Image (spheres, rainbow, N blue to C red):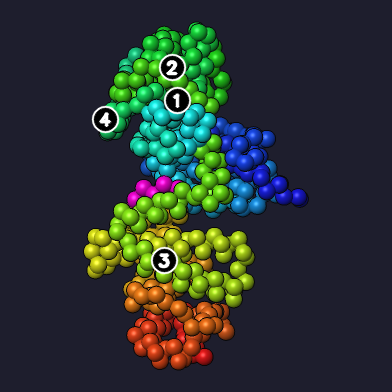
Amino acid sequence: MTAPASNVIASVDLGSNSFRLQVCENHNGQLKVIDSFKQMVRFAAGLDEQKNLSEEAQERALSCLSKFGERLRAFRPEQVRVVATNTFRVAKNIGQFIPKAEQALGFPIEVIAGREEARLIYTGVVHTLPPNGDKMLVVDIGGGSTEFVIGSDLQPTNTESLPLGCVTYSMRFFQGKIGQKDFQAAITAARNEIQRISKLLKRTGWDFAVGTSGSAKSIRDVMFAENPQEADITYAGMQKIAARIIDAGSTKKARLEGLKPDRLEVFAGGLAVMMAAFEELDIQKMMVTEAALRDGVFYDFIGRQLNEDMRNQTTAEFQQRYHVSLNQAARVAETAQHFMESICHAYNTPVQELAHWQQYVRWAALLHEIGIDIAHTGYHKHSAYILEHADMPGFSRQEQSILSLLVLGHRGDVRKMAEPINGNQMMWFAILSLRLAALFCRARLPLELPPFTQLRLDEHGKGFMLRISQSWLDEHPLVAGALEYESEQWQKINMPFTVQPQ
C-alpha cells in the first residue's frame, strides 16, 4: 500500500462521547480536510462507580479503532497524532485497555492532561477565529470534562479543566423522566464545580465568549431552528429549551428541531452544564465555532513539523522558572545524546525510533536539575516529581512519565528503576546514557570526550560496554572512580556495565 504524500496528516481525537478521525492536507499552514470519520462511542458511559470501564464499552471502542486503523494503515508514524481525553484520564483499568487500543489503531495514544486539552482546544479556535487583540473565553463541553480557556493571542493566559461533561451529567441526572428538580440539581452541581475557577476567570476577564464542540453546537442549532435571527447562545434561549424538555419529560419527547439523533441521549447534560457556566460566569451570550480539539491537534502538529514545538518552549520556560544552569544542562544533553546515538546504532535501532528517544533524552537532560531549586539533597526525586505532576503544555501524560522516570534514574541506586521500566530496552539505553552524561559532566566545565568513545551492548547482549581512552581515564581519576561505582550499580540488576580502555 502506497503511503500518503508527506503533506497529508491525520489526527485522532478519542473523546468521552465520540471518537473522531480527520485527515488533512497541509498547504503551508493552511489545512484542507480530505477525509473524516466520527463514531459515537459513549466511552464515558462505560464507567462504573469504581471508575472501571465495562467490557462492552471497551468493545465499542476497539471496534471503532479498528476501522480508524484500516484508514490509517499506510500512514507513517510522523503523519499521525492520537490524543485521548477525560475518560482515558480517569478510568482505573485504562492501563490494560490502551495496549489493545494501540494495536487496533496501529499508532501510539497520548493521554493528555486536562489543561493540555484546554490549550489544544484554544489553539484550534485561535487559528480559525483570531481574537484581534480582544480577550476571548472559550468553553468546550466534552463527554466527561469541560475546558475553560482565556486568551488574546496564540498562547492562552488561563487554561482550566473540570470533571463535568454531557455524558457524565446525562447519566447522573437524566436517566428517567426529566423534571424541574433534575435540571436544577444538575445546574447546581455544575455551578459548584465551576465556582472553583470562577473568581480567577472573572479577575482575568474577557471581551467575548466562544463555545466549541458538540454540546455548544447542538444548543446553537436548536436555538437557531426556533429563531433563525438568533445566531448566538443566550441564557433565555436555553431556559426555553430546558422548559420544553421538562414539559415533555425527556429530550426525545420534546422533539427539538435541529437536534441530531446522535445527541439525544447526552443533550440534557450538556445543556445543564452550559446553563451553569452562564450563571456562574455571568456570560451574556456566546458565539459558536466549528473549531475543536482536533483542529488544535493539527495546528500544534504543524508547529512541531516547523520546529516550533510547544514542548521545546515549555522546556525553556521550566529551565527559567527553576533557575537551571543552561550551560550545564546543554553539556549533559549533548553528551547524553552522544551515548544514546552510539548504543542505538550498535543495536541497529530504526532511525525514526532513535530520533524519538533522542528527544526524550534531550528534554530529560535539559530538565534533570530543576529539583535543585527545591533542595540539593535528593534533587533528582524533586525533579522527577515536578515532571510527573506539573502542567507541561505540549507534553502528553505518557511523555511526562517518561521524562520523570529518566530523571529519577539518572543518579542513585539503579535497582529502583527495575520495576517501573519493566524490561523496556530503550528506556534502559536512555537511562544509562543520561547517567553517564551526568557523570562525565560532573565538573560543570566544558567537556570534550576522547575520540572513539563509544557505548555498546556487551557480547552477550545483556549488558553494556564503554570503550574509552585509557590515557584520558588516567588524566581524569574522578571520572574513572565514578565509572567503577556505575559498574557496581548495574551488576545489582544483572545488566553488567564494563569499561573497556583503548
Marker disc for residue 203: 4
Q: Please tell me which residue is depicted at 65% across the width and 40% down the height of the picture.
A: 27
> x and y percent of residue 379 in the render?
28, 65
Q: Mark 3 or mark 1, which has the lower sequence index? A: 1
Which callout, 4 or 1, points at the residue further toward the start of the chain? 4
Residue under label 3 = 330
Which residue shows up at 47% across the image and 85% down it? 498
Q: Which residue is mark 1?
A: 211
Q: Hey, which residue is sitting farthest right in the picture?
A: 1
Q: Which residue is mark 2?
A: 233
Q: Earlier in the sequence, mark 4 or mark 2?
A: 4
Q: Looking at the picture, does residue 25 appear above or below residue 481?
A: above
**Which of the two labelled residues, at mark 2 and mark 3, occupies the earlier sequence position?**
2
Q: Decide if residue 176 is in sight here.
A: no
Q: Is residue 37 left or right of residue 91?
A: right
Q: Amino acid at mark 4?
A: Arg
Three-letter amino acid code of the residue under disc 3: Ala
Query: Which element carries disc 2, helix, strand or loop?
Result: strand
Vertical placement of 114 versus 461: above or below? above
Q: Which disc is residue 247 wearing?
A: none
Give the magenta range: 390-394
